[in-house]
Amino acid sequence: MNRPVTDTRLNFQLDEHGGLRHFLSIDGLDREMLVRIMDTAEPFAGVVADQPVKKLPLLRGKTIVNLFFENSTRTLTTFELAAKRLSADVLNVNIATSATAKGEKLLDTIRNIQAMHVDMFVIRHSESGAAEFIARHVEPHVSVINAGDGRHSHPTQAMLDAFTIRKHKPAFERLRIAIVGDILHSRVARSQILAFNTLGVKEIRVIGPRTLLPVDAESLGVRVYHSMDDGLQDVDVIVMLRLQKERMRGAMLPSELEYFNCFGLTRERLRFARQDVMVMHPGPINRGVEIESGVADGKPSVILQQVSYGIAIRMAIMTMAMHSKSRHQGEA
Ligand code: CP
């Protein structure tokens, strides 16, 4: 399988010692780094999550600002919980009531909040490249974490997905993973494909109608299918995606019912996959559009585990970015 070309511009997310300075994209990160993130998340998902007092002092005294220019339920709340569990001071800026609504430019907003002695920004934005743009303009001690930019990248989602898979099926090199649906508009799919390839997954398939797949999909390092019956044969993991209508220009499908009939995940279709298949979805799910309720709530579904593990993965990434070697030296 082809390994997609790496975007070396994004290597600046690492510091001079190879530690995380920002977390903007899976692109530019090697297998060792992805494994290190998951290993760091392990105790946060286990011991810490089960404690009556789920607090650690790792980011005490640090100030983290969540700046979400797009809607979110899972990512925003798990980033907030992750920061609080690490004892950071965390602030969610309400964009609807902020000065952005009065026309303030993005960098002016960032510079003003940065002046409040902020250590980390967590950014979600509808423009691809927004988090990287901000990362290139913040002060050296400030980290930027990408919480989803346009259709480009959602790297913490890809990491929590890889972590969830590893919990159940740790041998990535033996896995066949199918990603189903609106690949074209999906930052999650793009980041997952990069992460799964970097982790050595045996085979990654994308399944969807031609209108919802990139024309050069194979160049991402995947096999392309337009039929669920063929694409789901013997897969170990199925990742369902929603139709991202907010990023579609014009009608790309005859109807949602037609889409469900062709590409919806039903109990009937699960029979094509391996018996112990895991069903995943980054959320939000649209029942009866891309997934049948019985599957979303059924035994093979790990959809809610993904949400829980999102806290541990985000704790790991924030801790690593704040504790990179150069930062310690800078603070010494
Ligand atoms: N998976 C995900 O990004 O969900 P939210 O849009 O709710 O954050």
Image (cartoon, grey):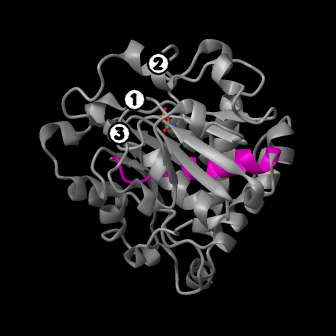
**Residue 279: image location, x then y, percent:** 67, 32
First reached walking from the N terminus: tag 2 or tag 1: 1
Q: Amino acid at mark 2?
A: Phe
**Residue 290: image location, x then y, percent:** 50, 23
Residue reaching furthest to the front: 230
**Viewer-nearest of labels 2 and 1?**
2
Q: Is residue 111 magenta?
A: no
Magenta part of the chain: 151-168
Q: Which residue is mark 1?
A: 243
Determine crowd level at label 3: few under 14, some 14-19, many 20+ residues with C-alpha closer than 10 A.
Answer: some
Please name whichever residue, 128 or 50, is drawn nearer the observer in this view of the structure.
128
**Viewer-nearest of labels 3 and 1?**
3
Determine crowd level at label 2: few under 14, some 14-19, many 20+ residues with C-alpha closer than 10 A.
Answer: some
Q: Can the viewer see residue 61 in this picture?
A: no
**Residue 141: image location, x then y, percent:** 46, 73
Q: Which residue is mark 2?
A: 260
Please name whichever residue, 130 or 80, is drawn nearer the observer in this view of the structure.
130
Instruction: Give the label on residue 210, or none.
Output: 3
Residue drawn at 42 percent across, 42 percent down: 183
| Badge 3 vs badge 2, beta-carbon distance below 8 Å | no
Residue drawn at 53 percent across, 87 percent down: 16
What distance separates the C-alpha of mark 3 from that of mark 2? 15 Å
Q: Is residue 2 left or right of residue 233?
A: left
Q: Quadrant of residue 121?
A: bottom left
What distance separates the C-alpha of mark 3 from that of mark 1? 14 Å
Q: Amino acid at mark 1?
A: Leu
